[in-house]
């Protein structure tokens, strides 16, 4: 699964989950304000943000477990904010699978069907079908306490789907799992949630996980929803410096856009369509490449070894930047280097954008700019 | 480094504890079974079950046994329901009032029953509940619910209420969640709480005397009347009847805990 995967086709304008102007409570005080976003049926939206920002509170509010302060929540076009949790068509899955310990695996999955009055035989047959879909066909009569962590997650997911929800909310579903198990559970979730499935919102503080799992990403910061966009767009063009900082983009360079449409900074001049005036450039390390140059403006301060290759820390005037060596180049500490910017992989945020978090303008037309 | 040995070994403490716990019960059994126990002999000269048989054949005592059982069962059920709800609310509560509410739950446990009884008696009489089984049960409920609430506050610490939240979003109403999830999950703790509430009522004397106004005669009330009349032998037999059900209840709780792996 990648960030470039096709988005599911929207069935109708108000289908799936629509949140508008939602105010979320944190304990006794106001928390988040004016949360607005949409998730189409079959679409997976990753809600990312730093710890303690209110991701879980937002999910619990949408699920009806906490009353909203204001705003509307619509499921398939139906206003649900005043309804009880069981009437909303929204299933909320906790980080740790909350399986009922007094019921066997099959009875756990049949639980929501029995609530709906589905006959015993039909409920058990449907539960067995769902159990087979999560590759646990032989576990029907097991006690849930005897299952492994990954198996519990899969049973919880099968049970959630047995409720045939319009919206599925997953609260950090992979956070407590080791990397191998995380991949197993993530793949199982993706395999189960097809394009005709529910609208899915998954909370995570792991950007890589969001990239692997979701079609779109919503970045939640203390100021509110800072950006909701396709995963690739968020990563390449963060809407604000705050989003860039959260995403861990290491290069945040202050400069100015001149009349000729160039962003000028310690990096040199980078073509941009951003508005004239003070601006900030944000870029990942691999958007800047370094090559040896006796007249270069940068000095290599250190070389960091990573799994994907080395990353250079380059002093460029007053700025410390991170860049990757140009292909076929060997660079050492103390070398003089020139930096090239991949223009379509950087964002230049005018001061207004940087402050308000509004969407940046697309940058220049050149593939790269030598600086 | 050599581990330092405790001054008194654990075995000695165990023997002391067993002696302190078992000696009164052993002496009670001896006194209830003793027909002739002359001074200064350390054991009865003649022992049989005649006192026990005599006590159990008394209609008054059988009536007291039934009244005690009804009160214990009713109080146990009501205290468990109230204490469970209050304990869960306290555990889930946030903010400053949580401390106030927890302190309030302690009050009926800390205050001596006889002190509580004086206040309750006035209200019970004005409500027409004085001298009735219902009035005495309500009086017993005050300390029993306090104990059970505190039990649940402890037993539910760290409890994850995710099961109930998830049941709601899976389509369960509040009642369905209670019957299908909460009660089955808390089953062993509800059983223990019921036993605790029932035992508080079973041994209650002061509140029964004050609110029962002599009309409600429970086993402790009958026992007191034998002791005050100087009939040690019948008094000991009645005391044995009073002591056995709680011991059996503790045994049942212990067995249940062993079977489910829970801590009693």
Image (cartoon, rainbow, N blue to C red):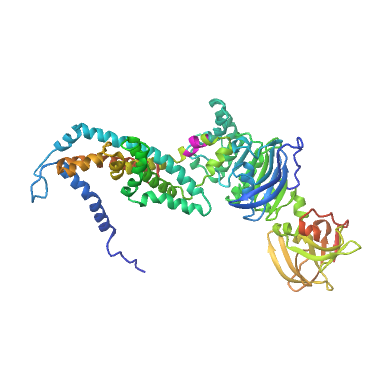
Is residue A345 within the magenta segment?
no
Left of A116 or right of it: where is A76? right
Measuring 85% from the left and 60% from the top, which residue is drawn there? Answer: A368
In the image, residue B114 above or below residue A328: above
Residue B142, can we see it? yes
- Residue B159 placement (x, y as % from top left): 49, 47
Q: Main secondary structure of the magenta part?
A: helix
The count of marks equals 0
The range drawn in magenta is B176-182
Nearer-the-camera pick, A237 or A141 = A237
In the image, residue A7 above or below residue A206: above
- Residue A198 placement (x, y as % from top left): 67, 37
- Residue A279 placement (x, y as % from top left): 81, 63
In the image, residue A360 above or below residue B230: below
Nearer-the-camera pick, B83 or B244 = B83
Would you identify the image quadrant in which residue B261 lies? top left
Residue B258, can we see it? no
Q: Residue furthest front?
A: B126
Which quarter of the rendering shows the N terminus of chain B?
Answer: bottom left
Measuring 31% from the left and 65% from the top, which residue is drawn there? Answer: B5
Measuring 48% from the left and 35% from the top, which residue is drawn there? Answer: B179
Nearer-the-camera pick, A122 or A70 = A70
Left of A324 or right of it: where is A133? left
Left of A43 or right of it: where is B229? left
């Amino acid at each position: 699964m990648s960030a470039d995967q096709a988005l599911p086709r929207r069935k109708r304008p108000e289908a799936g989950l629509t949140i508008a102007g939602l105010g979320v409570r944190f304990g006794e005080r106001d928390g988040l304000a004016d949360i607005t976003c949409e998730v189409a049926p079959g679409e997976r939206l990753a809600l990312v943000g730093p710890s303690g920002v209110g991701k879980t509170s937002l999910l619990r509010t949408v699920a009806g477990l906490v009353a909203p302060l204001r705003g509307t929540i619509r499921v398939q076009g139906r206003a649900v904010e005043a309804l009880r949790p069981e009437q909303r068509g929204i299933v909320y899955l906790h980080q740790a699978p909350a399986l009922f310990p007094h019921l066997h695996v099959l009875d756990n999955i049949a639980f929501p069907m029995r609530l709906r009055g589905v006959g015993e035989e039909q409920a058990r047959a449907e539960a067995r079908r769902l159990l087979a879909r999560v590759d646990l066909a032989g576990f029907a009569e097991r006690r849930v306490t005897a299952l492994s962590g990954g198996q519990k997650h899969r049973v919880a997911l099968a049970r959630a789907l047995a409720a045939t929800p319009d919206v599925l909310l997953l609260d950090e579903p992979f956070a407590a799992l080791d990397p191998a198990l995380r991949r197993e559970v993530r793949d199982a979730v993706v395999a189960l949630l097809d394009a005709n499935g529910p609208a899915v919102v998954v909370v995570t503080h792991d950007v890589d996980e969001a990239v692997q799992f979701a079609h779109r990403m919503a970045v939640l910061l203390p100021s509110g929803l800072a950006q909701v966009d396709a995963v690739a767009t968020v990563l390449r063009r963060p809407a604000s410096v705050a989003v860039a900082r959260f995403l861990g983009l290491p290069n945040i360079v202050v400069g100015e856009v001149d009349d000729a449409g160039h962003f000028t900074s310690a990096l040199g001049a980078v073509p941009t369509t951003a508005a004239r005036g003070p601006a900030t450039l944000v870029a990942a390390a691999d958007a800047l490449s370094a090559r040896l140059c006796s007249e270069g403006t940068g000095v290599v301060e250190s070389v960091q070894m990573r799994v994907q290759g080395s990353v250079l820390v380059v002093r460029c005037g007053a700025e410390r930047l991170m860049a990757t060596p140009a292909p076929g180049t060997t660079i050492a500490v103390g070398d003089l280097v020139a930096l090239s910017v991949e223009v379509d992989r950087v964002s230049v945020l005018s001061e207004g954008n940087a402050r308000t978090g509004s969407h940046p303008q697309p940058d220049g037309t050149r593939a790269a700019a030598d600086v | 480094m050599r581990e330092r040995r405790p001054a008194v070994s654990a075995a000695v403490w165990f023997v002391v504890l067993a002696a302190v716990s078992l000696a009164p019960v052993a002496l009670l059994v001896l006194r209830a079974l003793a027909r002739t126990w002359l001074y200064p002999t350390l054991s009865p000269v003649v022992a049989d079950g005649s006192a026990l048989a005599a006590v159990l054949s008394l209609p008054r005592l059988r009536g007291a046994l039934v009244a005690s059982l009804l009160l214990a069962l009713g109080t146990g059920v009501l205290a468990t329901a109230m204490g469970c709800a209050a304990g869960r609310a306290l555990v889930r509560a946030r903010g400053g009032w949580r401390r106030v509410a927890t302190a309030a739950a302690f009050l009926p446990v800390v205050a001596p029953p006889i002190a509580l009884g004086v206040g309750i008696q006035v209200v019970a009489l004005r409500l027409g509940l004085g001298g009735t089984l219902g009035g005495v049960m309500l009086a017993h409920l005050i300390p029993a619910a306090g104990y059970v609430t505190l039990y649940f506050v402890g037993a539910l610490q760290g409890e994850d209420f995710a099961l109930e939240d998830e049941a709601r979003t899976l389509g369960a109403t509040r009642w369905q969640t209670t019957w299908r999830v909460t009660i089955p999950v808390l089953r062993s703790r509800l059983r223990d709480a019921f036993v605790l509430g029932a035992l508080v009522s079973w041994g209650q004397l002061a509140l029964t005397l004050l609110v029962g106004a002599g009309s409600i005669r429970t086993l402790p009330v009958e026992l007191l009347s034998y002791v005050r009349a100087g009939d040690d032998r019948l008094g000991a037999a009645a005391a044995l009847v009073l002591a056995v059900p709680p011991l059996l209840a503790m045994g049942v709780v212990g067995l249940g805990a062993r079977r489910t792996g829970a801590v009693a």
